[in-house]
């Protein structure tokens, strides 16, 4: 349970500290910034507590998670349960046989005698057009007390025989082993290698700073147990798909769309993703994600025609979403009596414990309690910490390299109009756990990872690391460079700390290295940059034939303006502008200043307000981002 009074005290202290510190801090800060601006490289030794990454090529500010401008968005929440009662059914597993049990103690005693339950299987149905969105739920068969599961995914319903009313429904997922899986495990066990497993646990849209704010118990657990954070982990693309695909394929977004085009049915099945490489080398693979409509490989995409992993939980999640849902912030937070997020965590726990002594690669991702809200994750803090403690207690960490991470921070809403919000969107949290066996076997590789804590890092580095793990596991695997970032290297490799966003293949708009300092909004160059951006938006609308439907924008007001510092390794100067337009939309752009009123847009433009309502007149996701319907 969250201790609310504790939070209040924490906030009061944080506020009072913030009231006094900034006065001193900003004066010093101003002097420091001026000196940095004019100094040569050799003098550029920075105060560590001021920067997460501080090298002559990259300066990422170390902002306080409880920065004054952020506190008004910070409202910790309690856990919101989806069921007042204990679950009426649960599944146990013994000797590879899964059994469902009715727990009559979960209902009032007068009901116990006349409950009737039935079980149906949930399977992927063979649908040619929508193979990844279609499931079949079989006829529901009555059972009493307990019965053996016929399939791993089931739906259960119970009625009160007297009133004939349904009193309970739920879904369950069991992890049993087929002959093929058993054969895979045996072949791996008899080979002479001792492979390391890989486990990804992702929570969508959580910045490093929001992680510290919203998940304090989890944060404390990771810090106390020496998980390794990458504090300068900078996203490489806007939303989940490009960032996950950079991890899985090493491709940038345009290459991903070219090779793995997710809007073309069957293309993702042929996509060279790392989990396929692991699978080919006899790792047992698994993948689960909640909120099926917006899942990483399915949001406005076709997904997979064949299950991409040995254990593929999408049919189970789709089945769970057919239960009575309670939506929060636009997501199916409750799926029947369980939160969708905990369903994923439970699967991750079951999978990683079931296969803790076997080579496995698994990917688990949650959206429902974090995608659209800064504070909802705080209710899950205890659950997430419990999950990590549980898998640690069961020995999962002994053989598994765990990546606990997010893809980016919150991308929309008022927090994004702040400087902290700018940084948070681009710097997701990531922690890595490495088995003691690895540390003993590969001490220098482990030390290399430790140095990455304060380096600029990217999803492409994870891609390189995943390949490296196969090699360090003693498997016959040839590493290749990341196509999207040829200079990127495994986190276990020794690399120079001096690294620029260009080296890491992070385009200027997403790069947090620039040390951006405020410029007056009235500055003529800022005004010109804003006009230039509006022109660019017009051009994008015109290029997609949207001009007849979408209104013409003009610059309204500049919300913030910043200019990049001069780094000795390059001469480019970038302006970062957040502006409101007429009609009212909020955009953020990073433009290269080429002198006078000359600019160049080198990457994306972000739309910061919630625009669903004003962009209904157009279909395409890309055009929606720029459109305000006439
Ligand atoms: C760095 O800055 C912080 C606060 O701005 C200060 O407390 C600390 O003493 C400084 N450290 C060094 C080594 O100058
Ligand atoms: C299933 O229920 C029966 C009683 O109906 C009991 O004897 C049996 O032990 C139960 N099986 C399991 C696996 O719990
Ligand atoms: C792997 O092999 C060892 C002995 O060679 C055996 O003790 C162990 O149970 C096997 N593990 C699995 C998961 O098959
Ligand atoms: C390693 O794999 C390559 C290609 O997959 C194969 O040609 C080679 O024989 C393998 N080497 C060993 C030692 O198994
Ligand atoms: C993406 O990668 C390809 C190489 O496959 C490269 O040619 C292209 O310039 C990259 N795109 C961006 C936007 O960096
Ligand atoms: C606007 O800001 C830029 C960057 O700080 C500066 O170089 C320029 O001189 C400013 N322009 C005016 C007119 O003050």
Image (spheres, rainbow, N blue to C red):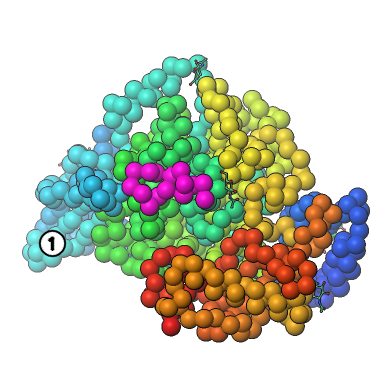
Residue 198: x and y, percent?
51, 37
Q: Image check: 317 left or right of 554?
A: left
Residue 609: x and y, percent?
52, 75
Q: Is residue 395 above or below residue 200?
A: above
- Asked if residue 552 is among those painted magenta in the image, a careful observer would answer no
Residue 509: x and y, percent?
64, 61
Looking at mark 1, is its residue's CB closer than 8 Å to ligand 2? no
Residue marked by disc 1: 160
Q: Quadrant of residue 329?
A: bottom left
Quarter, ligand 6: bottom right
Residue at screen point 27% across, 47% down = 131
Q: Secondary structure at mark 1?
A: strand
Residue at screen point 65% across, 31% down = 439
Q: Nearer the viewer, residue 349 or 532?
A: 532
Residue at screen point 13% across, 62% down = 160
Q: Nearer the viewer, residue 538 or 444?
A: 538
Q: Nearer the viewer, residue 448 or 37?
A: 37
Q: Residues within 10 Å of mark 1 (few under 14, many from 20)?
A: some
Residue 211: x and y, percent?
58, 59
Q: Quadrant of residue 37?
A: bottom right
Which residues are drawn in magenta? 254-268
Q: How many marks?
A: 1
Q: Is residue 142 above or below residue 148?
A: below
Q: Is residue 543 visible?
A: yes
Q: Is residue 348 visible?
A: no
Residue at screen point 66% across, 80% down = 558
């Amino acid at each position: 349970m969250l201790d609310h009074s504790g939070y209040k005290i924490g906030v009061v202290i944080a506020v009072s500290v913030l009231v006094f510190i900034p006065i001193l801090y900003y004066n010093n800060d101003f002097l420091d910034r001026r000196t940095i601006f004019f100094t040569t490289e050799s003098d550029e030794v920075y105060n560590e507590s001021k920067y997460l990454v501080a090298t002559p090529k990259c300066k990422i500010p170390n902002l306080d998670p409880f920065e004054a401008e952020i506190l008004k968005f910070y409202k910790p929440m309690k856990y919101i349960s989806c069921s007042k009662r204990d679950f009426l059914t649960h599944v146990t597993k013994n000797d590879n046989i899964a059994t469902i049990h009715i727990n009559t103690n979960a209902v009032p005693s007068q009901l116990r005698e006349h409950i009737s339950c039935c079980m149906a299987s949930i399977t992927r149905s063979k649908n040619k057009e929508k193979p990844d969105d279609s499931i079949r739920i079989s006829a529901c068969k009555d059972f009493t007390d307990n019965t053996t599961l016929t399939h791993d995914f089931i739906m259960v319903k119970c009625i009160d025989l007297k009133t004939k009313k349904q009193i309970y429904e739920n879904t369950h997922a069991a992890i049993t082993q087929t002959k093929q899986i058993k054969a895979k495990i045996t072949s791996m066990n008899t080979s002479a290698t001792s492979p390391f497993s890989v486990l990804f646990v992702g929570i969508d849209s959580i910045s490093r700073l929001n992680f510290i704010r919203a998940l304090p118990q989890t944060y404390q657990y990771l810090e106390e147990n020496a998980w390794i954070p990458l504090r300068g982990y900078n996203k490489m693309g806007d939303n989940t798909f490009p960032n996950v695909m950079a991890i899985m394929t090493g491709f940038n977004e345009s290459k991903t769309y070219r090779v793995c085009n997710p809007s073309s049915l069957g293309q993702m099945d042929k996509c060279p993703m790392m989990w396929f490489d692991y699978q080919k080398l006899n790792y047992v693979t698994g993948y689960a994600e909640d909120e099926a409509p917006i899942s990483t490989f399915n949001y406005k995409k076709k997904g997979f025609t064949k299950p991409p992993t040995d254990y593929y939980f999408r049919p189970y999640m789709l089945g769970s979403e057919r239960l009575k849902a309670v939506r929060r912030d636009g997501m199916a937070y409750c799926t029947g009596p369980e939160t969708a997020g905990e369903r994923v965590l439970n699967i991750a726990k079951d999978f990683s414990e079931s296969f803790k002594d076997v080579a496995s690669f698994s990917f688990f991702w949650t959206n429902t309690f974090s995608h659209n809200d800064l504070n909802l994750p705080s209710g899950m803090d205890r659950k997430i910490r419990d999950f990590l403690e549980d898998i640690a207690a069961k020995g999962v960490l002994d053989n598994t390299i765990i990546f606990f991470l997010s893809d980016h921070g919150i991308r929309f809403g008022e927090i994004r109009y702040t400087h902290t919000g700018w940084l948070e969107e681009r710097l997701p949290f990531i922690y890595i756990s490495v088995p003691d066996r690895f540390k003993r076997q590969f001490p220098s590789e482990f030390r290399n990872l430790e140095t990455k804590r304060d380096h600029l890092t990217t999803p492409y580095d994870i891609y390189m690391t995943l390949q490296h793990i196969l090699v360090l596991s003693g498997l016959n695997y040839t590493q290749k460079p990341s196509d999207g970032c040829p200079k990127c290297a495994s986190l276990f490799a020794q690399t120079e700390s001096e690294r620029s966003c260009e080296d890491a293949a992070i385009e200027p708009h997403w790069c947090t290295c620039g040390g951006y300092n405020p410029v007056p909004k009235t500055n003529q160059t800022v005004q010109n940059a804003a006009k230039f951006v509006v022109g660019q938006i017009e051009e994008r609308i015109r290029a997609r034939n949207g001009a007849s439907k979408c209104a013409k924008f003009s610059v309204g007001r500049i919300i913030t303006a910043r200019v990049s510092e001069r780094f000795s390794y390059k001469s480019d100067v970038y302006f970062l502008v957040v502006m409101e337009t007429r009609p009212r939309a909020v955009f953020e752009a990073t433009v290269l200043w080429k002198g006078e009123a000359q600019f160049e847009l080198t990457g994306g433009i972000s739309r910061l307000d919630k625009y669903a309502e004003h962009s209904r007149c157009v279909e395409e996701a890309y055009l929606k981002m720029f459109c305000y319907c006439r």
